[in-house]
Amino acid sequence: MAPKSPTPPWDLLQQASARMGGELDKGARALAQSALSKLDVVSREEFDAQSALLKRTRERVIELESTLEALTRAVEEDSNEE
């Protein structure tokens, strides 16, 4: 008679989870929430809001750079004419 191979660990975890009625899932979720709360993370809504603000700011910087270049050229042309 061949020796019985050991049960894989993932099977044991599934069996334990089924027996515990989801308590393992609740514990894992609580552990994950605890770990995430220690990290410096933001909500998806806050991330999207900041991304939109950054996009508008970049557009404004490009606009102001163009204006500055035009004004610089105008000043240089005026100083060259004198």
Image (tube, rainbow, N blue to C red):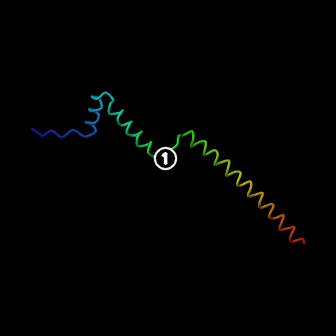
Percent across and percent down for residue 43 are: 53, 40
In the rendered view, does 1 fall on the left or right side of 69? Answer: left
Q: Residue furthest left?
A: 1
Image quadrant containing the C terminus: bottom right
Q: For the point 85% across and 67% down, which residue is it?
A: 77
Image quadrant containing the N terminus: top left
Residue 3, quarter of picture: top left
Number of numbered discs on residues: 1
Residue 79, quarter of picture: bottom right
Q: Residue furthest front?
A: 38
- Pointer 1: residues within 10 angstroms few (<14), some, or many (20+)? few
The residue labelled by disc 1 is 40
In the rendered view, does 57 fall on the left or right side of 80? Answer: left
Between 4 and 23, the residue placed more toward the observer is 23
Q: Is residue 78 above or below residue 32?
A: below
Q: For the point 28% across and 36% down, which residue is it?
A: 13
Q: Is residue 76 above or below residue 50?
A: below
Percent across and percent down for residue 38 are: 44, 45
Percent across and percent down for residue 27 are: 35, 35
Between 40 and 57, the residue placed more toward the observer is 40
Percent across and percent down for residue 55 are: 65, 48
Q: For the point 83% across and 65% down, which residue is it?
A: 75
Q: Is residue 18 above or below residue 52?
A: above
